[in-house]
Image (spheres, rainbow, N blue to C red):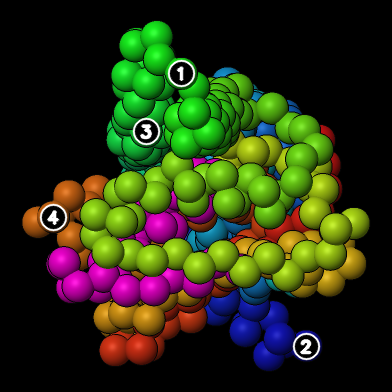
Amino acid sequence: MVNEKRAFESELRKFSFLASFSIDQLEEISSIALKLSLKKKVVVFRQSDHSAGMYLILKGAVKIEREDSEGETISMGQLSGYQVFGELAILSKEPHQVTATTVEDSELLLIDRSMMLNIIRTSTPEQVLEVFSILSDQMRATSGHDFETELSRRTLVAQMEAEKQRALTQMVAGVAHEINTPLSVINTAVNIMARELAAPVEVTVQRAADIAESLELMRLNVERADRLVRDFKKISVSHLQDDKEPFDISEAIEETVGLVFVSLKRSQVQVKFHNKLASEQKIWVGYRGFLSQVVINLLTNVERYAYPKGAGGIVDITIRLEDDKHYCLSVKDYGRGIPGENQAHIFEPFFTTGKSFGGTGLGLAIVHNLVTNSLSGEIRLKSEEGKGTEFIVIFPRVILD
């Protein structure tokens, strides 16, 4: 029993602000403080809760999160053994500014304000100064991290919006280029008809056939131009509104590929779309705009990084069912591949190896954010240098509110 007590007091001394305390002081803390054994995913306290106590982590880990003014949850990091949280409650009567949740089975020690005041009364002035100095440093570090996290988040939001507009600009350029072809054909057909009908001569079978052929060319190319405009309108509006709706997911992917076709063709990137869905599996209740942005960003990543400039190559896009409740979207190239040391960082904001040719380091960060948040899914990477890269997106067939 004595050995267990001494061992526990030795554990307490591992907390920096208790390191200078005497055996008697540590004995008092160990005898009075409340020891908590909590399972994984237990909320210790919530943001705005009032509780006059701080927590010492003896074992396990705790994640710290904060909800901003827009209701978005921001991760503030994770704490583990011999770290402290909730210290603001000791130094003031303000409510907690964060939510603390265990991420694994944990053992915590709760020290409330009255206990801390009693400890202070029996401490030397040097010990009191050291305690408050250490706690103040930790609070400053937390506040600094909070500021940096918020600044980084706002920067990322602004950059993501800029990237979304860039994607729209790219689609506008693609549509403008593509629509020139049917308009040119229509213009040629109109000129042929004008020439044939200009002179009041007898309409022969051949002339009638020429006019009929011109009319058919006009009809087909008007339909093509109309389809391009309608496809662009559907995707561009959904980019701006992000409304959830039921639609044919395979058709939406094909439309998106069609709208960035010009850019891909210029880089000699050939897209092969493989639809592995049965007709009854194609209707997705989700966000057309978010899906199209994921596809565009992944294709842009292929265009920019997968193949040597001017060489081009093939990219396979496949949509199929992962299981009864989830889709699987695969975007696979056969190019350079991603070096092993970079693979753990590719979804981090502003990480890029391609600044020299226009990379912002945001394309895949945006994809990860859209997949995990907006599509309630996950994204996986398979890559081997010299053999290519595959991004696999798993997301539910119905996005819940």
Magenta stretch containing residue 270, yes or no?
no
Q: Amino acid at mark 4?
A: Phe
How packed mark 3 is, by other alpha carbons closer than 10 Å (few <14, some 14-19, many 20 or more), is: some
Q: Amino acid at mark 2?
A: Met
Q: Quadrant of residue 74?
A: top right
Name the disc covering residue 357, or none: 4
Between tags 2 and 3, which lies in front? 3
Q: Cα distance, mark 1 to mark 4?
A: 62 Å
- Sequence-wise, which precedes: disc 1 or disc 2? 2
> In the image, what residue occupies the spot 52% across and 45% down?
256
> In the image, what residue occupies the spot 32% across and 74% down?
313
**Residues shaded magenta:** 292-318
**Which element carries disc 2, helix, strand or loop?**
loop
- Asked whether the residues under the numbered discs 2 and 3 touch, taking CB atoms below 8 Å apart as contact, a structural biologist would say no
Q: Cα distance, mark 1 to mark 2?
A: 118 Å
Q: How many marks?
A: 4
Check disc 1 and report the residue beneath it: 202
Name the disc covering residue 185, or none: 3
In the rendered image, the quadrant that contains the N terminus is bottom right
Q: Amino acid at mark 3?
A: Val
> In the image, what residue occupies the spot 33% across and 55% down?
264
